Structures are given as C-alpha cells and as structure tokens.
C-alpha cells in the first residue's frame, strides 16, 4: 500500500478534491457539526416545552443544568447503572469472544466459516427484535429460561421485576449481541501471530498453557485493547435494550445515561437538561477511554 | 467455505505432533468442536425460538409446559401482522429508506474517501484527522438539536428527515480511504497524462476499482440503516411512515401479552438483514477487519 | 452496474423518496386528520362512514396510536409541527396542552352549537376541560375507576360488601385471602400512580401546594393513604407485580389469583369478551369506599376520560370542528359505547344505550357523582411518573415512606421550578402594571 503523497499536486487536483468532498462535508457539517455546537448552547439554557411554545420563557442558566445534574441522585444512579453495564458486560464479552476465537481458530476446529457466521448473526440482528425476544424469554413465570432453570432445580428468577437480575438481563442481551463482532476481530488478531513463534516454543517443550500465556495473550494485547475500547464505548451508550425490555425499571435500575437523556429530552422535553446529560455522557466515555489508554501505556506489551 | 482473509497464510496442517498419542488428539478435537457446537446452539437459541414461537397458535409460546416446537404450525400471526397491523407497510418503509440511505451515502463517502486518499490538496491530512476525532462523540449528543434543526427545515415526520442523518459518516469515508490508498498512483498519473480530467478519472478509473469496498460499505450502511431505532423513532410520528424496528417497538408496548405475534414481528424484522448478511458476509467481514485492526 | 446506470438508480431512489414524503390528495375531498388512542382508535373508524355521508366534502383519516406512546407522540408532534387537525386527548393532558398554546379555544363554538348541552353531562366533566376560563376540549367519554370483584369469592368469604370504609374494605380483602393462602385479594400494579393518588384524594390530600407551585406529598393525609396502600402489599393482600408482570389479567382473575382489581369502564365489554362463559355470572363492580365509615359515599375516584380537541395549527379547523360536533351527539356517543365500551359523557346517551339500567354500569354511575381531577398543572404527567417510582420504592422496601415522600417533594419542586418562575414573573408583571 503506497503512502499518500501530500507534497505537490495540481490546482486541478485540489479543485476536484473539494468538489468530491463537498457532499460529504456538507452533510457532516450540517447534520452533525451544527447540532453538536447547538447542543452545547442548549445545555447552557433551560430550554423546555414552555420554551418551544414561547421563546421568551427560555433563560440562560450557564452551568446550572450541569450543577443540578451533578447534585441529582437520579443522575448518579444512571451513571452507576451505566458503569455497571460496562463493567459487567465488557469483560464478559471479551472473555467469551476471546475464548470463542481461540476455539474457532484452532487447528482442530471444523467448519470454521460456519461457526464464525453463526456467532456473528446476533450482531446483525435488529436490536429491537432481539429485545422483544429477550422479554418473552425472560418472563418470570412462563419464559423458557425460568422453565429450564426450574427443570434443573433452580427456583425461578424474577428477571424483569428484580432490579439486580434485570441488570443482568440487559447485560446478557448486550453480550449476546456484540461478542460475535469481537470474536471476528480476535480471530484476525490470532491469525496475525506468526506460527513460527509457536513452533519455536513447542520445540523448547512448552505446553498449551505456556503457549497461551506467553505468546498468544501478550501478542493479542493491541487487539484486546481495541476490542475493550469499542465494547466499552458501546456499553456506555446502551439505550434500546432497557427502552424495550424494562423501560428503565424496575426502580430505575436499568436506566442508563442514554435512556435518561432520551426521557428528559423526548418524553418531558427538558431539552437543556437532556443536552447536558448527553455531554456528561460524552465526558464519561472520554474519561473511560483515556483510562484504558493510560493502562495500556503503563504496561507496554512484551515482545 | 469462506475463510477469513489474512496476510499471513496459516499452515492448516501444522507441524506433526509426533509426541501426542492419537486418542488424545481426537479427544481434543472432540472437545473443541463440541464446545463450538454448544456455543453455536446457545447463540442461535433465541433466534430459533423466535421463529418457532412465531408459528405457534396464540397462547402456546408461554404456556405450561414449555414447548420448543409448535403443536400445529400456523401463519395466523403473520397474516394478522400484514393485514390488520400493517407491518407490510413498515417493511416497505424500512426497505425503501435503507436503500435510499445506502445509495446516497455510498455516493458521498466514495467521493470523499477517494479525495482523502489520492488527491493532493492543502490541509488534507489535518482535515482527515479532525474528522477521525469526531468519531469519539456519541451520537446521542446531537440527536435533540438535530431534531430541532429538522423541524426548522420542515422535515419532521418525513422520510427525508430520517435520510439526512445517515447520509455521510466518517466511518464510511475512513473505510473507502483505507481501501483507496492501495490504488497505484501510476495508474492515476497515466490517466492524467492522457489528458483526462480529475472527475473523469474518478468516475471511469477509480470507481470500478473501489467496487469491492463499496459493496462492503453498502452492506454495512444498509444493515445500520435497517436496524436504526432511535432516530426514526423520534422523527417519524405518522404510523404509516414508521420503519420496522419502530413499528415493532410500538407493537411490543401495546401487545405485550401476544407473544407469538411479537415473535412473528421480530422474524419479519430480522430475516431480511440476516439473509443479506449470510449472502454477503465475506465482504462484510473484510470490511470490519479493514476498518478496525488497523489501529 | 455501469456508472450511468448507477446514477439513474440513485436519482430514481431520491425522487421516489421525495415523492413519498409529500402528502397525498384525496379525490377532491378535504382530509381531516384525527388521532385516537388504543381501542378508541380502532373503534372510532366505524363512525366515519356516516359522518362522510352527511358531509360529502370531508374525509376523515383516523390514525390509531397506542396509549403507551400517546403522550410522547403528541408532544413530539407538537415540537415538530406535525400535529393533526383534531385528536382525542386525555383529561389530564389538557392543562399541559393549553399551557403550550397548542389547542384552539372552543368555548364560543360550543356555545353556538346545537350539538352540545352542558346540562346533559356529569358535573366534573366540563370542569376538567376548562383552563383559565376558556374551554379547550369537548368531553367525549367519561372514565373513572371502580372495583371489579369476584362475586362468588366475596360471598364465600362472608366479606362485608359493598365496603363502606377503608377498614371494611381491608376486612373483606383479608377474608377473601384467607380462602386460599397462595392467592391474593386485590391486584394493584405497583408501577401505576392512579391508585395511590386516588386514595390520597379520598383523604383530602392536596398533592401540590402554593397554587401548584410545589409538591406537598409529605403531609399527614397523603402519608396515611400511602400507608394504607403499602400495607396491602406488606400483608400479602396484593402481589408486588408491575403492569408487565401480569401475564393475562382475565385469565388470572378467572383463576382467582386475585379477587379484585381497580379499573375503568373499558373492561365492562372486555370482561364479557375475554372471560369464559361460566365466569360471566361471577363478577360485578362496586364503587370505591371512602376512608371513614359514615363519610360521603362513595369515596372520590379519579375523573378520567377523554375529550376531543382541535389543534391551534390545524389545517382543517372547520372540518375538524364538524367531526367533533358529530362525535358529541348522543346517538353517536351511544353507538361508540356499544363498540368501545367507553361511557358516554352525556346522560341522554346513557338512557339510549340502556346503560342506565345495567347493574354493572350502576357502580360507575354512582361513582361519577364523586370524581376529582388530577392537579391541573402541565407537569402532572411527569410528577405522576415520579409518584409511581416513589410508591414502588416503598412497596419493594427499597426506601422508607418518609424518605420516599421527602424525595418526591424535592422532585416535584424541581419539576415545577419553571412553572414557579413563570407564574411569579407573570404576577410581578401584573403588579407593575397595576402601579402605573
């Protein structure tokens, strides 16, 4: 792949470039950048339903929305819920994906393409459809999951009515949906490890365990890091699952930040507040990504 | 059998393990494949149950004792969805919108991706880096003001309003650019020497080469557009214009007790994208790898 | 695909998208767009042909919206300038829509119209449509909540019936529950606010204070109502289920899983439809009991129901108004009742349909004499949602009643902050004007 040349180039090229760029840039500018800046301004006002009826009722409140939110226990509950989703879901997804990738990539595996396709199917499944299935699956009395559990002697779990289990229900859907994507990436990562390394280690008498710990995992670090960031960013933005399955309940245990933003914004039309929530979510995602980046920098990969 | 693309060929046979007894190897193979099958069943179970329940007569899916297969398969729920509840209309809406978004988006992203990859102009790399940085911003941030913007353009409750949000994506531009980087410069220079204009080069020389990545991006975009939930939910208020996921969510709120009906609706929503994915998965997977393992 | 082929394809797609985004015109007639919710949305369509026969220049397009999405959808449409011409509107939403100046004033039209007769309606009904001295909606159907119960279980338990006080009601519940220990006496979905609010209203709790500027849930009357309500769960008389936890209301009622539930008139026809034939003689309705014996009977219940409104920005205000007039005629109200089961807001329609003689509707007739509306503040939907959460917290034992009520007041105060600001500002303006 040749490196892009930036020096030189005719004015004809530059002209053509701007023509080719303009539709995309226009769309991005108009429908992404403009709302982004507008959201910032919105978050500094108390724009709400009254404001939509009559602009004269809108007040500039500066950082008022932000301070209100930071003092609101409901906001912190949503932050906590979102973090729980991420902390529960992230490692589960990564471990499942890694384990699956190792299996799929193993020399002993047959029908690799088939398995990879099957594991990826949940990723393309429409989230709302999956959520609807989940809700039926997890019905406390009649759902298949509890029927199976009671068949093996475990008493039925109130998946949707108990705050703790409802969280797990949402996380399980998220893990189911995303682990296939991570698996594919891990497989590619595994395949980029030269077999010569394995051969050399085996010749020295290393067993499978040693091979995994000393070669596979360390060399997968960049891939793992990438997967971790992607997964966590996705989990922080979780919205459709709680919206469809639990509507944020029970007792707001599954109200994520994105769901709270949606409710404030599109249910009650407190637009200023909702915009502030969205920016705080953004800050949270940035912070989490920065932490993960810092962890990676602090522990450089072994060669 | 489609295999994953990789730069380094994997030696499938591997060095012979003379030391391990054959039984152990066979046991290991059994374990590995067994686990894979178990995982596959687990993964597919919700989808299979969804299909099965959609064919069950009303009340059977969540009855006691638990059934995995319908006692007598029936298409009554599908009939109800299409006749009484107009899910066919939502299906067409989804199809239409997804195709439109894909077409427009491909056009915009192909042009921009090529420009960033192969055309030299001032500030190109800085602009591209800036665009990449915007990938960090979660989509929820701009949803509300975008809605107000759409409203001021009079596009609320119109399909055009749904379209505009999906037209150009930085990810799409990134993908095309990555691919376009591999176009040999000599090819382009030769065309320039022949006197072709830049636009002509783009249309006649570059686009055909970009076809594979455009297929990949097309699949991506179509899937994303089809599965999109929050934006159509917010923009389209007319029941007649709703897309499938939104219609399904509405149905779910209203008919939460009609499980079989819900499952039929879910099948209708999911089947097209699953079929599309199975048919074009090679392109799709290539795209993910191209776009992610890079860095 | 060749380049030009692709370009044509794209253009065709774009064109088709644009065309389908534009409105259709309907064979020369003017189209009146009307939104109705839930069951009403399905049934009101049957009344359209007669209207169109009488008004050949009009065509009514009915869009049915599920109840659960209705409030959100109306607000979204309001913000997006996508409201229809007319709509069904829940009573509790009228103050909100009036505050947004979304509705067209109807007082003058109603006074002029021959279709309306204010004396023919129930007392509180017109009142809930009035905000700031102007009428914003025409009552369509009335709705209140009464107790649906299993007659055979009540008899078997020798329960005091109908209950004339909360104590009697509790005794009845305890006796019924004693019949079968793993069943319950009454179903009260814990994520709804209507029931606990009704109990509060019966005790005379103000709910809000300072003219609807602040929350006032943390006070003795509402505390007592909440204590009674949560006590039912604590003592195993009501199952801690939320709306989605009830697999099938009718099935479980028929099985005796619970012997009572509180609901509205739509279930009169639903029960007849959904219960098995042998159950049809075994259920009835009773009005809500007051807190104290000897108090005014029955106890207050929620003044629900829906009105018909015309939106201020309607494109066909005249057509919309004619449609509303038509729906308000006693004959049409009677017909609508036959289909949807909603109680007509006009008493004359009650006579026509024979509702006046129906024993099961009698409870509603009695109850309608004692109804109270929800506080008429635009933010009530939001406060109600917080009330439901607070109640659920106490029922599930996640919070004590005291802390939940205090938090609820804080929530209500925050939600009402903008309203306080606007009211105070308006008062200040009036004061300065007076001093000129």
Image (tube, rainbow, N blue to C red):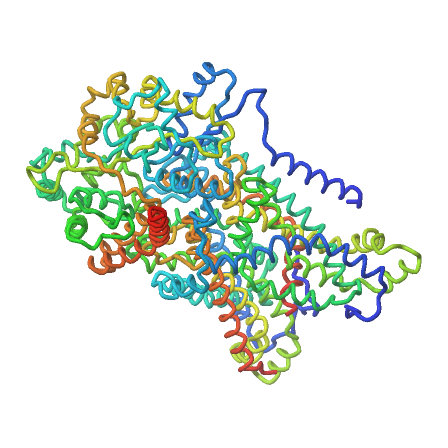
The residue sitting at the bottom extreme is A204
The N terminus of chain B lies in which quarter of the figure? bottom right
Q: How many marks?
A: 0
In the figure, residue A190 lies in which quadrant? Answer: bottom right
Q: Is residue C403 left or right of residue A223?
A: left
Q: Residue at x 93, y 57 (%)?
A: B194
The residue sitting at the right extreme is B194
Q: Residue at x 30, y 33 (%)?
A: C305
Measuring from the top left, give residue A218's x and y in whole percent. Answer: 56, 78
Q: Is residue C35 left or right of residue B25?
A: left
Q: Is residue C244 visible?
A: no
Q: Is residue B226 left or right of residue C403?
A: right
Measuring from the top left, give residue A92's x and y in whole percent. Answer: 45, 65
B294 is higher (above) or lower (below) than C23? below
Q: Is residue C342 visible?
A: yes
In the figure, residue B193 lies in which quadrant? Answer: bottom right
The residue sitting at the front extreme is C436
Q: Residue at x 65, y 63 (%)?
A: B131
A202 is higher (above) or lower (below) than B195? below
Measuring from the top left, give residue C367's x and y in whole percent. Answer: 19, 31
Towards the viewer: B81 or C221: C221
The C terminus of chain B lies in which quarter of the figure? bottom right
In the figure, residue B292 lies in which quadrant? Answer: bottom right
Measuring from the top left, give residue B174's x and y in whole percent. Answer: 68, 61
Q: Residue at x 15, y 53 (%)?
A: C220
B267 is higher (above) or lower (below) than B20? above
């Amino acid at each position: 792949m040749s490196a892009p040349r930036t020096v030189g180039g005719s004015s004809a090229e530059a002209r053509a470039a701007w023509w080719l760029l303009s539709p995309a840039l226009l769309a991005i500018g108009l429908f992404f950048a403009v709302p982004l800046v507008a959201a910032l301004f919105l978050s500094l006002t108390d724009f709400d339903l009254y404001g939509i009826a009559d602009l004269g009722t809108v007040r500039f409140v500066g950082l008022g929305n932000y301070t209100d939110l930071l003092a609101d226990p409901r906001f912190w509950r949503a932050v906590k819920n979102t973090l729980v989703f991420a902390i529960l879901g992230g490692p589960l997804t990564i471990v499942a994906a890694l384990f699956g990738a190792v299996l799929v990539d193993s020399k002993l595996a047959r029908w690799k393409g088939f398995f990879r396709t099957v594991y990826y199917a949940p990723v393309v499944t429409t989230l709302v459809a999956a959520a609807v299935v989940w809700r039926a699956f997890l019905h406390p009395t009649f759902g298949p999951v509890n029927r199976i559990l009671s068949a093996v002697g475990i008493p039925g779990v109130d998946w949707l009515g108990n705050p703790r289990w409802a969280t797990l229900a949402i996380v399980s859907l998220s893990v189911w949906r995303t682990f296939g994507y991570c698996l594919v990436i891990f497989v590619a990562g595994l395949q980029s490890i030269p077999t010569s390394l394995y051969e050399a280690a085996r010749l020295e008498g290393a067993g499978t365990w040693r091979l995994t710990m000393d070669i596979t995992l360390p060399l997968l670090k960049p891939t793992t890091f990438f997967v971790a960031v992607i997964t966590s960013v996705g989990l922080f933005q979780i919205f459709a699952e709680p919206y469809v399955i639990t509507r944020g309940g029970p007792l707001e245990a599954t109200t994520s930040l994105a769901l709270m933003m949606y409710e404030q914004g599109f249910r009650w039309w407190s637009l200023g507040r909702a915009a502030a929530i969205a920016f705080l979510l953004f800050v949270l995602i940035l912070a989490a990504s920065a932490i993960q980046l810092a962890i990676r920098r602090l522990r450089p990969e072994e060669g | 059998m489609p295999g994953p693309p990789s730069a380094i060929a994997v030696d499938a046979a591997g060095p012979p393990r003379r030391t391990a007894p054959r039984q152990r190897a066979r046991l290991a193979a059994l374990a590995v494949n067994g686990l894979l099958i178990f995982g596959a069943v687990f993964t597919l179970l919700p989808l299979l149950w969804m299909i099965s329940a959609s064919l069950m007569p009303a009340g059977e899916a969540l009855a006691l004792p638990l059934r995995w297969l319908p006692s007598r398969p029936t298409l009554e729920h599908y009939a109800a969805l299409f006749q009484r509840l107009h899910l066919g209309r939502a299906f067409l809406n989804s199809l239409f919108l997804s195709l439109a978004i894909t077409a427009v988006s491909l056009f915009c992203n192909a042009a921009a991706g090529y420009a960033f990859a192969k055309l030299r102009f001032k500030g190109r790399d800085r602009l591209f880096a800036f665009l990449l940085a915007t990938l960090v911003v979660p989509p929820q941030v701009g949803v509300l003001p975008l809605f107000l913007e759409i409203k001021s353009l009079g596009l609320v409750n119109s399909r055009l309003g749904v379209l505009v949000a999906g037209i150009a994506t930085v990810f799409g531009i990134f993908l095309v650019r990555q691919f376009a980087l591999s176009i040999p410069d000599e090819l382009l220079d030769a065309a320039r020497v022949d006197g072709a204009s830049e636009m002509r080069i783009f249309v006649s020389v570059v686009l055909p080469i970009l076809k594979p990545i455009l297929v990949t991006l097309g699949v991506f975009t179509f899937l994303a557009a089809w599965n999109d939930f929050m934006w159509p939910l917010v923009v389209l208020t007319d029941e007649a214009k709703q897309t499938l996921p939104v219609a399904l969510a509405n149905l779910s709120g209203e008919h939460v007790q009609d499980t079989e009906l819900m499952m039929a609706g879910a099948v209708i929503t999911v089947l097209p994208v699953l079929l599309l994915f199975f048919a074009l998965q090679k392109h799709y997977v290539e795209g993910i790898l191209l776009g992610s393992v890079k860095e | 695909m060749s380049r030009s082929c692709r370009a044509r394809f794209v253009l065709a797609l774009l064109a088709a998208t644009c065309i389908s985004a534009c409105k259709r015109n309907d064979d020369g007639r003017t189209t009146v767009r009307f939104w109705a919710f839930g069951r009403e949305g399905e049934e009101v369509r049957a009344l359209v042909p007669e209207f169109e026969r009488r008004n050949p220049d009009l065509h009514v397009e009915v869009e049915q919206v599920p109840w659960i999405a209705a409030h959100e959808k109306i607000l979204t449409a309001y913000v997006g300038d996508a409201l229809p011409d007319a709509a069904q509107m829940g009573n509790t939403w009228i103050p909100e829509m009036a505050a947004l100046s979304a509705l067209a004033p109807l007082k003058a039209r109603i006074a002029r119209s021959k279709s309306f007769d204010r004396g023919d309606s129930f007392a509180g009904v017109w009142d809930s449509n009035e905000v700031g001295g102007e009428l914003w909606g025409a009552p369509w159907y009335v709705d209140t909540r009464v107790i649906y119960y299993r007659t055979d279980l009540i008899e078997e338990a020798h329960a005091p019936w109908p209950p004339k006080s909360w104590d009697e009601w509790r005794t009845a519940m305890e006796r019924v529950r004693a019949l079968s220990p793993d069943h319950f006496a009454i179903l009260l979905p814990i994520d709804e606010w209507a029931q606990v609010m009704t109990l509060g209203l019966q005790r005379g709790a103000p709910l809000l204070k300072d003219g609807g500027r602040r929350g006032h849930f943390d006070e003795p009357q509402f505390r007592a109502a909440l204590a009674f309500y949560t006590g039912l769960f604590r003592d195993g008389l009501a199952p801690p289920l939320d709306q989605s936890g009830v697999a099938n209301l009718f099935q479980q009622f028929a099985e005796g899983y619970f012997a009572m539930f509180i609901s509205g008139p739509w279930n009169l026809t639903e029960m007849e439809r959904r219960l098995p034939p042998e159950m049809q003689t075994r259920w009835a309705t009773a009005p809500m009991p007051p807190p104290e014996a000897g108090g005014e009977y029955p106890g207050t219940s929620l003044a629900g129901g829906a009105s018909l409104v015309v939106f201020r920005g309607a494109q066909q205000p005249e057509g919309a108004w004619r449609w509303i007039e038509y729906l308000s005629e006693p004959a049409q109200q009677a017909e609508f009742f036959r289909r949807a089961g909603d109680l007509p807001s006009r008493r004359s329609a009650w006579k026509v349909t024979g509702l006046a003689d129906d024993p099961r509707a009698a409870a509603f007739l009695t109850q309608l004499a004692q109804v109270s509306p929800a506080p008429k503040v635009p933010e009530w939907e939001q406060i109600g949602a917080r009330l439901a959460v607070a109640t659920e917290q106490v029922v599930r034992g996640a919070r004590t009643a005291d802390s939940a009520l205090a938090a609820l007041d804080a929530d209500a105060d925050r939600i009402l902050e903008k309203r306080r600001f606007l009211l105070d500002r308006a008062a200040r303006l009036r004061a300065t004007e007076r001093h000129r």
